[in-house]
Image (tube, grey):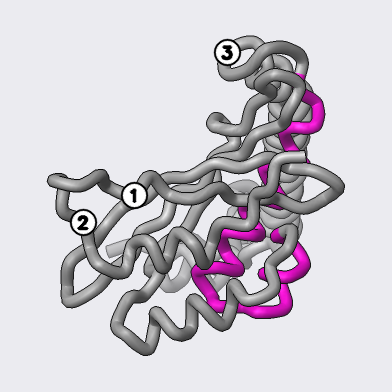
Amino acid sequence: MCAPDIALLEPLAQALGITVMEIISGVRAEQPIHAEPITSAVKEVLQYSEQEIARKGKTMRKRSMLVVLGVCLALLVLPMLNGVLFGDGFAWRCIPAWLCARNSAQALEDYDEERIKRTITRADGVYEALVELKDQGVVIRDARARLSRTRLDDMFLFTELELTVQQDHITYLFTCQGPWRKGQVEWMKFCVPRVGNVGPAWLPQLSEAIATYEPG
């Protein structure tokens, strides 16, 4: 076994780029971790994250703008299609008429006396008649008005009501229409079955309760 002269240890360490203790022990010391590369890497990751967040934010804003634009276009186009496909002309008033009919249908379903009087013409007595029928087990379960069935016909703006009524676990579906005038809707009578075509006994009473239409 041989070792370099002790006087040569320091010059040898400088030449090899190591320390005297590393030469003596024969083991390289652990190199200190420099913070600068780590800090740089962290900054790059943070910068990338910020860029991704900004990119996703722009994408979401674009999608939101497209949705809003699509809704606006639908509101502009639907009345024209409604008038062409389901009526006798251009029908800008179809949308407010449908909204009124929809509110009327919801009021009937909710048995909301105030809204019934606000949305239906000559609605005095409608709420009381519906409550009387409800006490008999005749209950309105679903009522709706559809935009596609709102139309101009002979210069009148007609809406249509679909009414689902339940009695003794039997469900009935009725449809009636009525004009929209002066911000309110008027519903016509249901088509009561003729003699020989048996229908529920309470149908004429329900038809009379909802019908508020008077030509004029």
The answer to whether the residue labelled 2 contacts the one labelled 3, judged by CB atoms less than 8 Å apart, is no
Q: Amino acid at mark 3?
A: Leu
The spot of residue 80 in percent (x, y) is 72, 16
Q: Is residue 174 left or right of residue 8?
A: left
The answer to whether the residue labelled 2 contacts the one labelled 1, judged by CB atoms less than 8 Å apart, is yes
Between residue 49 and residue 155, name the one nearer to us: 155
Alpha carbon separation for disc pair 2 and 1: 8 Å
Q: Is residue 63 left or right of residue 181?
A: left
Disc assigned to residue 199: 2
Main SS, magenta region, reads: helix
Q: Is residue 115 above or below residue 119?
A: below
The spot of residue 173 in percent (x, y) is 31, 52
Q: Is residue 160 left or right of residue 156?
A: left
Residue sitting at x 23%, y 63%: 200
The answer to whether the residue labelled 1 contacts the one labelled 3, judged by CB atoms less than 8 Å apart, is no
The spot of residue 150 in percent (x, y) is 61, 33
Residue sitting at x 62%, y 78%: 112
Q: Quadrant of the C terminus?
A: top right
Q: Amino acid at mark 1?
A: Val
Q: Mark 3, residues whose alpha carbon is within 10 Å: few (<14), some, or many (≥20)? A: few
Q: Which residue is mark 3?
A: 85
- What is the secondary structure assignment of the residue under circle 3? helix
Disc assigned to residue 147: none
Q: Mark 1, residues whose alpha carbon is within 10 Å: few (<14), some, or many (≥20)? A: few
Disc assigned to residue 192: 1
Range shown magenta: 91-120
Q: Mark 2, residues whose alpha carbon is within 10 Å: few (<14), some, or many (≥20)? A: few
Dot 2 or dot 3: first in sequence order is 3
Alpha carbon separation for disc pair 2 and 3: 34 Å
Residue sitting at x 59%, y 78%: 127
